[in-house]
Image (cartoon, rainbow, N blue to C red):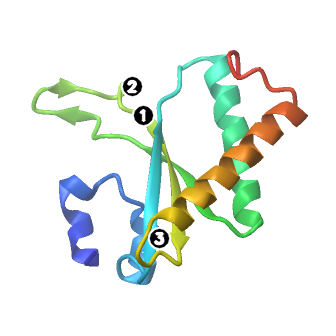
Amino acid sequence: MDAELLAVPEYAHLPHAALLRTGGGLDHEVLIQFELALQPSREGWHALEFLGWFVRDCARGGRKMQLRPFALPPETPNGRQLGHTLKFHLDLFVDGIEDSLAPALQVISEINRSLELAISLYKINVEQA
Protein backbone atom coordinates (compact mmCIF):
# COMPACT_ATOMS: atom_id res chain seq x y z
CA MET A 1 0.00 0.00 0.00
CA ASP A 2 1.22 3.48 -0.81
CA ALA A 3 1.39 5.75 2.23
CA GLU A 4 -0.49 8.43 0.24
CA LEU A 5 -3.61 6.26 0.34
CA LEU A 6 -3.83 6.71 4.11
CA ALA A 7 -5.49 10.09 3.52
CA VAL A 8 -8.42 8.42 1.70
CA PRO A 9 -11.48 7.92 3.98
CA GLU A 10 -11.76 4.23 3.03
CA TYR A 11 -8.44 3.65 4.78
CA ALA A 12 -9.27 5.58 7.98
CA HIS A 13 -9.37 2.35 10.01
CA LEU A 14 -5.73 1.50 9.32
CA PRO A 15 -2.93 2.10 11.85
CA HIS A 16 -1.58 5.29 10.29
CA ALA A 17 1.43 5.83 12.55
CA ALA A 18 2.74 2.30 12.03
CA LEU A 19 2.26 2.43 8.27
CA LEU A 20 3.74 5.90 7.92
CA ARG A 21 6.89 4.73 9.71
CA THR A 22 7.40 2.01 7.09
CA GLY A 23 6.08 3.91 4.06
CA GLY A 24 3.19 1.45 3.79
CA GLY A 25 3.04 -2.25 4.49
CA LEU A 26 6.18 -4.37 4.55
CA ASP A 27 6.86 -7.15 2.06
CA HIS A 28 5.38 -10.50 3.09
CA GLU A 29 3.47 -8.92 5.98
CA VAL A 30 -0.27 -8.87 6.61
CA LEU A 31 -2.31 -6.72 8.94
CA ILE A 32 -5.07 -8.53 10.77
CA GLN A 33 -7.44 -6.18 12.50
CA PHE A 34 -10.10 -6.93 15.08
CA GLU A 35 -12.66 -4.24 15.87
CA LEU A 36 -14.10 -4.07 19.37
CA ALA A 37 -17.07 -2.10 20.61
CA LEU A 38 -17.51 -2.00 24.37
CA GLN A 39 -20.43 -1.14 26.58
CA PRO A 40 -19.99 2.30 28.16
CA SER A 41 -20.05 0.80 31.63
CA ARG A 42 -17.82 -0.25 34.48
CA GLU A 43 -17.67 -3.76 33.01
CA GLY A 44 -16.71 -2.38 29.59
CA TRP A 45 -13.98 -0.29 31.20
CA HIS A 46 -12.65 -3.38 33.00
CA ALA A 47 -12.65 -5.36 29.75
CA LEU A 48 -10.73 -2.58 28.01
CA GLU A 49 -8.20 -2.38 30.84
CA PHE A 50 -7.66 -6.15 30.76
CA LEU A 51 -7.26 -6.15 26.97
CA GLY A 52 -4.93 -3.15 27.20
CA TRP A 53 -2.70 -5.06 29.58
CA PHE A 54 -2.90 -8.26 27.51
CA VAL A 55 -1.97 -6.56 24.23
CA ARG A 56 0.89 -4.62 25.85
CA ASP A 57 2.21 -7.82 27.42
CA CYS A 58 2.05 -9.65 24.08
CA ALA A 59 3.87 -6.77 22.37
CA ARG A 60 6.54 -6.80 25.07
CA GLY A 61 6.94 -10.51 24.33
CA GLY A 62 7.63 -9.84 20.65
CA ARG A 63 4.20 -9.88 19.03
CA LYS A 64 3.66 -7.05 16.60
CA MET A 65 0.34 -5.94 17.98
CA GLN A 66 -1.30 -2.84 19.35
CA LEU A 67 -4.66 -1.71 20.69
CA ARG A 68 -5.81 1.71 19.62
CA PRO A 69 -8.96 3.80 19.74
CA PHE A 70 -10.93 4.64 16.62
CA ALA A 71 -13.72 7.18 16.24
CA LEU A 72 -15.47 9.13 13.53
CA PRO A 73 -15.70 12.94 13.34
CA PRO A 74 -17.79 14.55 16.12
CA GLU A 75 -20.19 16.10 13.65
CA THR A 76 -21.24 15.48 10.06
CA PRO A 77 -23.76 17.11 7.75
CA ASN A 78 -26.15 14.40 8.98
CA GLY A 79 -25.80 15.44 12.61
CA ARG A 80 -23.76 14.97 15.77
CA GLN A 81 -22.19 11.55 16.25
CA LEU A 82 -19.93 12.29 19.22
CA GLY A 83 -20.49 9.65 21.88
CA HIS A 84 -21.67 7.01 19.40
CA THR A 85 -18.70 5.94 17.28
CA LEU A 86 -15.90 4.95 19.69
CA LYS A 87 -14.43 1.54 18.95
CA PHE A 88 -11.07 -0.08 19.47
CA HIS A 89 -8.89 -1.77 16.92
CA LEU A 90 -6.54 -4.55 17.80
CA ASP A 91 -3.91 -4.52 15.05
CA LEU A 92 -1.77 -7.59 14.54
CA PHE A 93 1.08 -7.52 12.03
CA VAL A 94 2.28 -10.94 10.90
CA ASP A 95 5.30 -11.33 8.67
CA GLY A 96 6.61 -14.35 6.82
CA ILE A 97 3.48 -14.58 4.67
CA GLU A 98 4.38 -16.03 1.28
CA ASP A 99 1.88 -18.33 -0.42
CA SER A 100 -0.54 -19.01 2.42
CA LEU A 101 -2.17 -17.35 5.39
CA ALA A 102 -1.39 -20.43 7.51
CA PRO A 103 1.36 -18.60 9.51
CA ALA A 104 -1.12 -15.81 10.35
CA LEU A 105 -3.76 -18.31 11.44
CA GLN A 106 -1.14 -20.01 13.64
CA VAL A 107 -0.29 -16.70 15.32
CA ILE A 108 -3.97 -15.98 15.94
CA SER A 109 -4.39 -19.44 17.45
CA GLU A 110 -1.41 -18.88 19.77
CA ILE A 111 -2.73 -15.49 20.88
CA ASN A 112 -6.15 -17.01 21.52
CA ARG A 113 -4.62 -19.70 23.74
CA SER A 114 -2.65 -17.04 25.64
CA LEU A 115 -5.77 -14.94 26.13
CA GLU A 116 -7.77 -17.92 27.38
CA LEU A 117 -4.96 -18.78 29.79
CA ALA A 118 -4.78 -15.19 31.08
CA ILE A 119 -8.55 -15.11 31.58
CA SER A 120 -8.42 -18.33 33.60
CA LEU A 121 -5.29 -17.37 35.59
CA TYR A 122 -6.73 -14.03 36.65
CA LYS A 123 -10.22 -15.48 37.12
CA ILE A 124 -11.78 -12.95 34.76
CA ASN A 125 -15.50 -13.46 34.34
CA VAL A 126 -15.81 -12.84 30.59
CA GLU A 127 -19.55 -12.33 30.89
CA GLN A 128 -19.07 -9.50 33.38
CA ALA A 129 -15.57 -8.20 32.51
Is disc 1 placed on a helix, strand or loop? loop
Residue corresponding to mark 1: 86
The quadrant the N terminus occupies is bottom left
The amino acid marked with disc number 1 is: Leu
Residue corresponding to mark 2: 83
**Disc on res. 18:** 3
The amino acid marked with disc number 3 is: Ala
Q: In the image, is 7 to the left or to the right of 60?
A: left
**Disc on res. 75:** none
Q: Nearer the viewer, mark 2 or mark 1?
A: 1
Label pair 2/1, CB-CB below 8 angstroms: yes
Residue 112 figure quarter:
top right
For residue 53, say whether it is visible.
Answer: no
Label pair 2/3, CB-CB below 8 angstroms: no
Q: In the image, is 102 to the left or to the right of 53?
A: left
The amino acid marked with disc number 2 is: Gly
Q: Is residue 55 above or below residue 103?
A: above
Q: Position of residue 84 (x, y in %)?
A: 36, 25
Q: In the image, is 16 to the left or to the right of 104?
A: left
The mark nearer the N terminus, 2 or 3, is: 3
Is disc 3 placed on a helix, strand or loop? helix
Q: In the image, is 107 to the left or to the right of 75?
A: right
Q: Would you call the spot at circle 1 few (<14 residues within 10 Å), some (14-19), or many (20 or more)? A: some
Question: What is the C-alpha distance between the residues marked 1 and 3?
Answer: 20 Å
Residue 125 figure quarter:
top right
The mark nearer the N terminus, 1 or 3, is: 3
